[in-house]
Amino acid sequence: MRVSLKDVAERAGVSIKTVSNVVNKYQHVTPAMRARVQEAIDELGYRPNLTARHLRKGRTGIIALALPELGNPYFAELAGAVIDAAAEHDFTVLLDHTRGEREQEVLVSQGFRARVIDGLILSPLELEAEDLQGREDDVPLVLLGERQYDLPYDHIAIDNVAAARTAVRHLIGRGRTRIAYLGARTDSANRPAHLRLQGWREELTQAGIATPDSLVGPVGGWDRWDGAKAMARMLDAGVRPDAVFAYNDLVAIGAMRVLHERGLRVPWDVAVVGFDDLAEGQFGAVTLTTVSPDKQAIARLAVASLLRSLEGGQEPAGRELTAEFRLVERESTLGRR
C-alpha cells in the first residue's frame, strides 16, 4: 500500500502543507517540526513520487551529461560526481558519449534529446563557437572544460595554466632542471594541452630554465600508450630529462612504465607529475604525484548552474566559474618514505 502525504501528516499531527514543505526541503521549517515530520516519514516508509513532482513543474527530472571519453577514468569519476550532485536535487542523469567528435557535440548541443531532458552539461573538445551561435534549443546548457566561447552559457573550468605552473614549480623545488612536458598537440582545438604547455613554459622561463623543443613530447592521444610512446621517442632521440610533467595521469603512467623498462628509477633518476588525480595513480609500484582538480566542486557548480536556469535565476548566463585544484605529492617526486 502506497503511503501518502496525508498519511504522514496524520501520523505527525501536522498539515499536509507542512509535510510537503519538509519533503521539498523548504528552508522555512523549524528544526523541531522538521524532525517531527521526518520521524513520521521514517516510521511509515514514505517515498516521494519524484516523477509527479517534476511533472507538476513541467519537467522530466532528467539532465544529460555529454562527455568525450567514457573510458577515461577522469570522466568516469566526474560523471559519478555529477550523478551524486544531481541526486541531491532529485534529478536523474542521462549519459551521452560524443567521442570528442564535433558532429556528435553539435548534435547533442542542438537538442536532439530536448523532449526528455531538463538541461544539458556538455564537455566539448571540438565544438566551435559558431556551432552554438543561434542555438534554437531552449534547454539550459552548461559547458565544462577549457574551451571558451564567449557565449551566454555558464562555463566551468580550472585554471590550467596556474595548475601546470604549480606542478612545474614543485619539480624545480626538488632540484630538477631538465623538465619535459609530455602531452603536446598540434591541433588548435585541444585547448587544455596548450594551456598546460603554456604553464610549463612560463614557470621554467621565470626560473631561468631553458625550454627547448626537444623536451616537449607530442602525443596522438592521452592514454597510457600515448605516454609510453612519447617517453620512448624522447629517450631514443638521446634526450634525457630529469623530470616529466605529463598532460594527465594516464600519460604519466605510460611514461613511468618506459622509464622502468629503460632502467631509470622514479623519482631518483626522473621525477614524474601527472594531472587529474585518478585512483589508479595511488596503486602503482610508485605512487603518482599529481594535480588534483576538485571534481566534486565542478559537478556541484554544473548542476547548480542548470538549476539556476530552470528556476529563472536573475543573473545573466555566460558566467566563468572556476573550481579549485591542489597538488597531491606522492612517491613519484618525493621517493618512498
Image (spheres, rainbow, N blue to C red):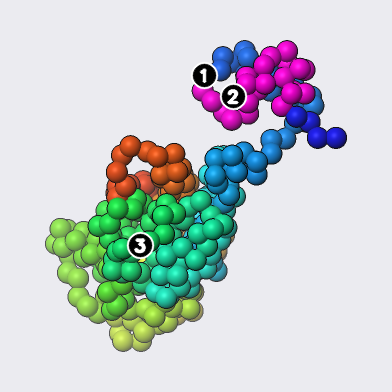
Q: Name which residue type carries label 1.
A: His
Q: Are marks 1 and 2 in contact (CB under 8 Å)?
A: yes
Residue tagged 3? 135
Identity of the residue drawn at 58% across and 49% down: 60
Quadrant where the N terminus sits is top right
The stretch of residues the image draws in magenta is 5-27
Position of 67 compared to 324: left or right?
Answer: right
For the point 81% across and 35% down, the residue is 2
Q: Residues within 10 Å of mark 3 (few under 14, many from 20)?
A: few
Above or below, 324 against 330 in this view is above
**Residue 45 higher or lower than 30, as above or below:** below
**Along the line of sight, which residue is nearer the eye, 267 or 258?**
258
Residue type at the position of mark 3: Arg
Q: Residues within 10 Å of mark 1 (few under 14, many from 20)?
A: few
| Label located before the other in sequence (3 or 1) | 1
Q: Which residue was labeled with disc 1?
A: 28
Mark 1–mark 2 distance (CA, rounded to whole Å): 8 Å
Expressed as whole percent of the image width and height from the top left, the position of residue 104 reads 45, 73
Which image quadrant is residue 49 in? top right
Select label 2 or label 3 by which is in front.
3
